[in-house]
Image (spheres, grey):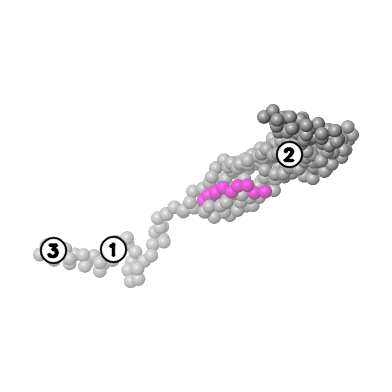
Amino acid sequence: MRKAVTLAAVALTSTLALGAAAPVFAADASPSPSSSHNASSSDSSASLRLSVASGKPGAEVKVTVKAPQGSTALSVSSKALEDVRLSPAGDGTWTGTAKIAKVADGNYGVSLTGTAPDGGKLQATAQLTVRAETPPPAPTSSLKLSADSGRPGDKVGVTIRTAADAKNAYVTSDAFGGRVDLKSDGHGTWTGTAVVAKGVKTGYYGVHAFAGGKEFDTVKFSTEAGGGGKPDVKPVTPLKPSEHKTPKGSVNTGQAPADTAAAAGTAEATTHA
């Protein structure tokens, strides 16, 4: 064993004397510190910020990107944003504006991608909530009649309630002879009086209600012809004596004809027999 160690020492001495590279034996090797850079670990050096956290379609959003100076291919994309364009603002800052796209309500991700000066990838994300404005519900218009039936000449009160800014309100019906305009109180209530037409026939008629020039409802109205007065019936009067008709061949005595009386007497005699 000692002989082998001696030979190795002699060989090493000879090698150093000749100026050759000395081999490193496994038993004497030790790891050296590494200073290599991981090119794909630059994500934390970039940031993405939006001027708002939520908005409605069509609203403008300002985008701010922070990244190492000299970064390239910076791009911001999202389904919720339209055409984001960035411009350098100096000191490693890029800015841009975009409009919120017409998308369904919900939460959307916004992504930044790019390349760092050392070739590493840049990535950052943000969130944007889209909330479309819900239009106010359209005012509900209503029609009310003071009666649902009538005779010619009857008056019927009409009331329409609708939007306060409506320019007009009226009803039309053959039962009323056509159109009946109403007056506004300035707060969405329109009133007026309709008169059942004189020549109306008995039956059912539609009353069409309009507000702002648009029809919104139709109700049924029944009519009874005759105007509701007493029937025109003349009383029966007895005939005057001079108006009695005298049968031919007889005298108007107020008694039954002779042949009729004779026949009645014969029938009575037969019965008693």
Of the pair 233 and 201, the residue shown nearer to us: 201
Q: Amino acid at mark 2?
A: Val
Q: Earlier in the sequence, mark 2 or mark 3?
A: 2
The answer for how far apart the CA atoms under marks 1 and 3 are is 21 Å
| Residue 51 visible to the viewer | no
Front-lying residue, 261 or 191: 191
Q: Amino acid at mark 1?
A: Ala
Residue at x 41%, y 61% (from the top left corner): 243
Category of crowding for the residue at label 1, using alpha-carbon neighbours closer than 10 angstroms: few (below 14), some (14–19), many (at least 20): few
- Residue topped by disc 1: 256
Magenta stretch: includes residue 218:
yes
Magenta segment range? 214-225
Main secondary structure along the magenta-highlighted residues: strand
Whether label 1 touches label 3, CB < 8 Å: no
Q: Seen in the image, is 201 located left or right of residue 133? A: left
- Neighbour class for label 2 at 10 Å: few (<14), some, many (≥20)? some
> For residue 65, what is the image quadrant?
top right
Q: Earlier in the sequence, mark 1 or mark 3?
A: 1
Dot 1 or dot 2, earlier in sequence: 2
